[in-house]
Image (cartoon, helix red, strand yellow):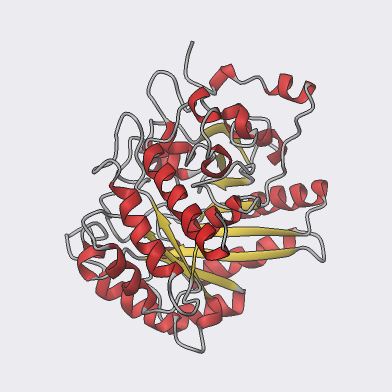
């Protein structure tokens, strides 16, 4: 049979039945292929897919120009009024301020007048300093930071290649970013959950920097490589939820919780972890290849590849790639057990990478299925109680 979707999902048949792809509205540019840290859970460097080794260390100006042209053409063709571009890596700040600001200018120049380009980058913050922040401000680039809580929690995984923890250096950068003169650049903090770290202490350590939002991520795992402590992630997340939900005043946004609440109230989703909204983002690697989300690197070598590139393909070609289409067709991409689940519209099958089973592919429930079900049930109960329902 082969692995789903592969050749098992016929996009032409979907289109004949009336399905139409959703245009890409977010683009992740891998402007730096290397990193100054060696996090042991990294979905690029510590995963089965090691394609980073054969790709350019930095995205060249020619590749940037070609990618920008393709993005501009896509925006024009689909009449988009706003797009988001995330400069990523590796560690994007390794590219240097001059290269980063040139990339920002190239991207904005490539889209039609009147189109808003929301530019951001995701960094480990150890290279953030005043000159870099001033350059990012001038280029209109917001900054998201990866940090796993306090020093003990963060340095379990987020270390330099020589084994030193990165917390102290990251905190120096974060303190600069969270100062009043730079706060408008601060887009939020991304934190990977570790069951060994106290949930509330982790949350409160992140709150010290007054982030506008916190993104709590489940560690990337699948049915071949299951997570540690099955069913413990719900308890961890519920503890943070209660601390967040019961605060007398709003302290920050927590993406996962807000998305679940929005879905419970009948809205759509905007993150990969839950919901059934079409995935409308595309990765451009440092060589110009067009790829799916990097998290797929944790499943098997070559999993994110589409076989397409900015050099040879229009971005609409990627929309019709079966693996991309599979993330836009909602419930039709889910396993039978998911379809009979009472929280399917909220869970959405969970993160796509977490559904993988070798030999049969991605048409399975998330390896975090029970955790997600319990978390959603808990949030539903708290929300119902708060709103005075039965």
Does residue 4 lie above or below 271 as drawn?
Answer: above
Q: Position of residue 215 (x, y in %)?
A: 45, 60
Give the quadrant of the C terminus.
bottom right
Q: Is residue 263 left or right of residue 121?
A: right
Give the residue at x 55% y 44%. Answer: 346
Q: Quadrant of residue 196?
A: bottom left
Q: Position of residue 40 (x, y in %)?
A: 25, 50
Q: Position of residue 203 (x, y in %)?
A: 35, 68
Q: Residue furthest bottom?
A: 181
Give the residue at x 36% y 34%. Answer: 222
Q: Residue furthest left?
A: 163
Q: Position of residue 365 (x, y in %)?
A: 45, 31
Q: Nearer the viewer, residue 347 or 124?
A: 347
Is residue 288 in view from this perspective?
A: no
Q: Is residue 68 left or right of residue 372?
A: right
Q: Nearer the viewer, residue 198 or 55?
A: 198
Does residue 235 lie above or below 303 as drawn?
Answer: below
Q: Nearer the viewer, residue 51 or 296?
A: 296
Q: Quadrant of residue 173?
A: bottom left
Could you tell me how many numbered marks the image carries?
Answer: 0
Is residue 139 in view from this perspective?
A: yes
Give the residue at x 50% y 56%. Answer: 31
Q: Nearer the viewer, residue 24 or 334?
A: 334
Q: Residue furthest front?
A: 390
């Amino acid at each position: 049979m082969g692995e789903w979707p592969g050749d098992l999902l016929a996009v032409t048949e979907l289109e004949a039945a009336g399905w139409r792809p959703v245009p890409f509205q977010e683009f992740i540019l891998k402007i730096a292929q290397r990193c100054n840290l060696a996090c042991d859970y990294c979905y690029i460097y510590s995963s089965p897919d090691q394609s980073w080794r054969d790709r350019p260390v930095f995205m060249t100006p020619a590749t940037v120009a070609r990618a920008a042209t393709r993005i501009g053409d896509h925006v024009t063709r689909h009449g988009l009024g706003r797009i988001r571009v995330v400069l990523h890596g590796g560690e994007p700040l390794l590219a240097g301020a001059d290269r980063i600001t040139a990339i920002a200018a190239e991207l904005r120049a490539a889209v039609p007048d009147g189109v808003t380009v929301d530019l951001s980058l995701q960094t480990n913050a150890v290279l953030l300093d005043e000159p870099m922040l001033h350059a990012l401000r001038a280029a209109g680039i917001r900054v998201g930071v990866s940090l796993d809580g306090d020093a003990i929690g963060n340095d379990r995984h987020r270390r330099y290649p020589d084994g030193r923890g990165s917390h102290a250096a990251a905190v120096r950068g974060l303190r600069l970013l969270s100062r009043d003169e730079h706060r408008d650049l601060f887009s939020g903090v991304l934190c990977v959950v570790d069951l060994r770290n106290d949930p509330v202490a982790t949350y409160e350590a992140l709150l010290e920097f007054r982030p506008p939002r916190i993104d709590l991520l489940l560690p990337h795992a699948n049915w071949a490589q299951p997570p540690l402590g099955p069913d413990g992630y719900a308890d961890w997340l519920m503890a943070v939820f209660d601390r967040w939900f019961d605060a007398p005043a709003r302290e920050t946004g927590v993406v996962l919780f807000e998305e679940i609440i929005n879905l419970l109230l009948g809205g759509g989703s905007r993150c990969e972890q839950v919901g059934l909204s079409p995935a409308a983002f595309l990765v451009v690697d440092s060589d110009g290849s067009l790829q799916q989300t990097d998290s797929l690197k944790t499943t098997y070598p070559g999993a994110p590849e589409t076989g397409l590139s900015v050099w040879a393909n229009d971005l609409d070609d990627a929309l019709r790639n079966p693996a991309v289409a599979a993330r836009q067709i909602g419930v039709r991409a889910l396993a039978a057990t998911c379809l009979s689940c009472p929280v399917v519209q909220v869970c959405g099958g969970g993160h796509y990478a977490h559904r993988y089973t070798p030999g049969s592919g991605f048409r399975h429930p998330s390896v975090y299925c029970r955790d997600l079900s319990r978390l959603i049930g808990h949030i539903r109960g708290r929300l119902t109680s708060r709103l005075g329902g039965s």
